[in-house]
Amino acid sequence: MTFLLAGCSNSATSDLEEHQKNELGEAIEELSFTPEIPREIPFKAKDIEITADRSLFSVKFIGNDQNELTYRSSLAPNTFDFTSEKVEIHKDLEGSYGNDQDHKILRWNNEDIFYELLANSNTTSKEELIKVARNVESY
């Protein structure tokens, strides 16, 4: 099932932009698991594209100026992996980070759910991806 939402953000008190997480609720009901979702992203989203099936939840946040951030959670790891650098997300949670010419990716596993943040290399920094990962929360 795919959803498209437009104009979905509020101002935030940090350097990340808060989006309306309740807009993701209908899609989460389609899943066979309950993922954590990011509370804030590094830019104001003008559109959100959501894909959900029983074992995969994907949200693409689309902003102005070519900004895109894709958040995925699933019950199985993505086999496409170019991460090699270990990064600390929280004191008890480690992830892996990588980049190629076009994209940056941050991956982690928490309670047997696999998470990924994928961003355009020129619009979102490694530090911003880590900040997004640090503010995921239960729906």
Image: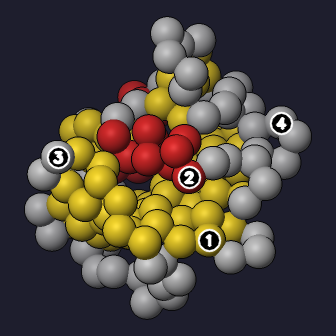
Of mark 2 and mark 1, the one earlier in the sequence is 1
Question: For the residue marked with disc 4, what is the amino acid?
Answer: Asn
Cα distance, mark 2 to mark 1? 9 Å
- The percent position of residue 107, horizontal first and vertical second, equals 39, 66
Cα distance, mark 4 to mark 3? 34 Å
Question: For the residue marked with disc 1, what is the amino acid?
Answer: Asn
Q: Quadrant of residue 95?
A: bottom left
Q: Residue at x 78, y 54 (%)?
A: 122
**Is residue 108 in view?**
yes
Q: State the residue in front, 132 or 6.
A: 132
Question: For the residue marked with disc 2, what is the amino acid?
Answer: Lys
Of mark 2 and mark 3, the one earlier in the sequence is 3
Residue furthest out toward the bottom: 79
Question: For the residue marked with disc 3, what is the amino acid?
Answer: Lys
Q: How many residues crowd mark 2 within 10 Å: few (<14), some (14–19), many (20+)?
A: some
Of circles 4 and 3, the one toward us is 3
- The percent position of residue 45, horizontal first and vertical second, equals 67, 33
Pointer 2 with pointer 1, Cβ within 8 A:
yes
**Residue identified by numbered label 3:** 91
Pointer 4 with pointer 1, Cβ within 8 A:
no
**Residue identified by numbered label 2:** 126
Of mark 4 and mark 1, the one earlier in the sequence is 4
Residue 99 has which mark? 1
Cα distance, mark 3 to mark 1? 23 Å
Pointer 2 with pointer 3, Cβ within 8 A:
no
